[in-house]
Amino acid sequence: MPTRLIAERSMNDWREYYRTRTVTPEQAVAIIKSGHRVAFTTGNEPTALSLALLARAPDLRGVTLFLPTPSRDFGWYDEGFEQNFTIEVGYILPVVREMVAQRRADYNVQTLRVEYGPFDRPADVALVELSPPDEQGKCSFGASLWNKKAEVMSAKVVLAEVNDRLIRTGGENAIHVSEIDYFVPHATTGRAPGATDLLGRKQAEPEQAEQEIGRHVASLIRDGDTLQIGVGSTSEWVARLGVLDGKSDLGWHSETTPNGIIKLVRKGVITGKRKTRHAGKVVCTAVGGGDIEDMRFVNGNSLFELYPAAYILDPRVISSHDNMVAINSAVAVDLTGQIAAESLGPTMVSGSGGHLAFATGANLSKGGRYICVMPSTAKDGKVSRITAAHAQGSIVTVPRTLAHYVVTEHGIADLRGRSQRGRAEALIAIAHPDFRQELRAAAKRLYWP
């Protein structure tokens, strides 16, 4: 039985516990056995522990590795490790997209509830990255909290890699050393993609369509609104294009802080003064997407509070914010208003994340708005993202009953209160002109006598 589960330690003896439980990465991962379920935590995987685990691969069989947001490549995604490791992911990012498409990795479906689904199956071993302990023996989870605390508390054994570069924030972003079984020093080596963001995605520049979409979205945002902007190449540009700079007293309650959000806080655009929950605070479960100066601004700043994903994504919490505006990207929208945001047909390209939770919460919020954004076409203009019907096998992320605004570079479609014919007409009006004629013909067959 892990010592942390049976011993209560005073504030004065945590240092001795921490000293005696600090081991080498190789000693720590020796506890992992064939058949174990090993859970990583959302955000960057701990480097030293990951490399030590990879080195043990020849001795292991049938170890399940659950990676909520796989962002770094340590080698186990390569062919040849199938007998050693079974890979499960909670979100499909570039480093595993090909592996998932080849069905060499499995997708762990995230459930909409106040506890995340994977923790119905506690890990045999959890791997987490933490800051060194403070004077009270508390370690920070850094810029990325998500569901780490729940994972640590439910796992049989917890291995922590101690990284002195992790920031500290307010909220519930800390854990006492007595909850951890073994500590190892941080390592900075290992294969990892370059020029990436918080989730390991390559940086890019906005297309003309994304600039137009940003301007349309800005027209739907009012002073004092509380915002959420989801992960997505289109939605995240809203914060970076300067279209929100003229707003005042915006609030923030979101999973992450996309690039540009911290600068809006520094400029005084996001103040949270009018929030009906956590007034005056920037609330999220992961903070990032900024440069070094942005992160220095966040570190130790009481404005920023990180809470577990189960709290941030609770639709009851989201809807308790008046004027909650949720902005999320989509892959395609059909003429009924069904929104697909995670797959191309049956092929997963991302994950559900918090999209449905925020769509639900924004719809239930007093004065709330749910905004779905996407360019009108894909594949260099050859495919319309507004479609008569989704491709066979497509995953519908948000049902038509929650659809509100759909925005492309060609305009805004307000679907609330519209009949099926009215929805089709509104969506066709913001489709790319090259596809409107065939969409009208399809709509006539589907919805008119």
Image: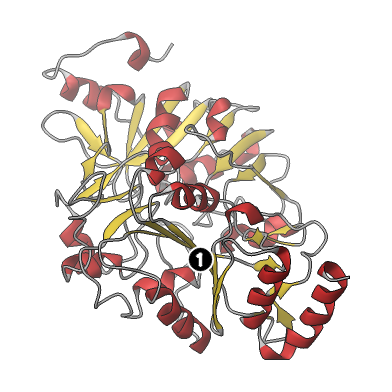
Q: Residue at x 73, y 80 (%)?
A: 383
Q: Pick the quarter of the image with the N terminus.
A: top left
33 is higher (above) or lower (below) than 70: above
Indicate the quadrant where residue 139 lies: top left
Q: Is residue 16 above or below residue 129?
A: above
Q: Residues within 10 Å of mark 1 (few under 14, many from 20)?
A: some
Q: Is residue 206 visible?
A: no
Closer to the camera, 271 or 207?
Answer: 271
Which amino acid lies under the numbered mark 1 shown in the image of this protein? Gly
413 sits to left or right of 136: right
Nearest the eye: 174 or 358: 358
In percent of width and height, residue 253 lies at: 33, 52
Spot occupied by residue 225 in the image (x, y as percentages of width and height): 31, 61
Q: Is residue 38 visible?
A: yes
The one nearer the camera, 425 or 27, is 425
Looking at the rendering, which quadrant does residue 336 occupy? bottom right
Q: Quadrant of the C terminus?
A: bottom right
Residue at 53% over, 25% down: 122
Residue 157 screen position, x and y as percent: 45, 24
From this view, report whether residue 328 is shown above or below residue 184: below
Q: Residue at label 1?
A: 232
**In-image side of 202 versus 320 (left or right):** right
Q: Residue at point 50% right, 28% down? A: 125
